[in-house]
Image: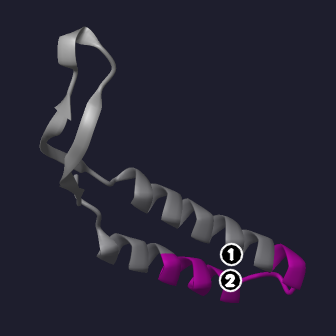
Amino acid sequence: MPLNKNALEQSIKSAFKNMKDGNGDEEQALNTLCSKLAEAVDAFVKTAQINYVTGLGTPSGGPVSGTFQGNLS
């Protein structure tokens, strides 16, 4: 699945909206916001897809070598 920037934006927006609904404890609100932002970024990065084209090989059954040719989406 390719990276979904819109989903990341919505998760971040939701985290900030939830911060407004806090109980007045600034430190707890900040911790919650940081946690929600970290979760959003973590989920976003984990959706990355590596698209390998060519460039790596194992000559004579040895270690993989070469130059990776592909992209990240």
Element class at badge 1: helix
Q: Position of residue 64 (x, y in %)?
A: 30, 26
> Which residue is located at x 26 percent, y 50 percent?
49
Confirm whether residue 33 shows in the render.
Answer: yes
Which corner quadrant of the image does residue 34 belong to? bottom right
Q: Is residue 45 one of those drawn in magenta?
A: no
* Amino acid type assigned to the residue bearing label 2 in the image: Met
Crowd band around label 2 with a 10 angstrom C-alpha radius: few (<14), some (14–19), many (20+)? some
* Amino acid type assigned to the residue bearing label 1 in the image: Leu
Span colored in magenta: 12-29
Confirm whether residue 25 shows in the render.
Answer: no
Q: Is residue 18 one of those drawn in magenta?
A: yes
Residue 4 as seen in the image, left or right of residue 55: right
Asked whether disc 2 touches disc 1, contact meaning CB atoms under 8 Å apart, the reply is yes
Which corner quadrant of the image does residue 43 belong to? bottom left
Q: Position of residue 16 (x, y in %)?
A: 60, 85
> Which residue is located at x 35 percent, y 71 percent?
7
Which mark, residue 43?
Answer: none
Sequence-earlier tag: 2 or 1: 2
Element class at badge 2: helix
> Which residue is located at x 58 percent, y 86 percent?
17
Which mark, residue 33?
Answer: 1
Which mark, residue 19?
Answer: 2
Q: Position of residue 65 (x, y in %)?
A: 28, 31
Dot in front, 2 or 1:
1
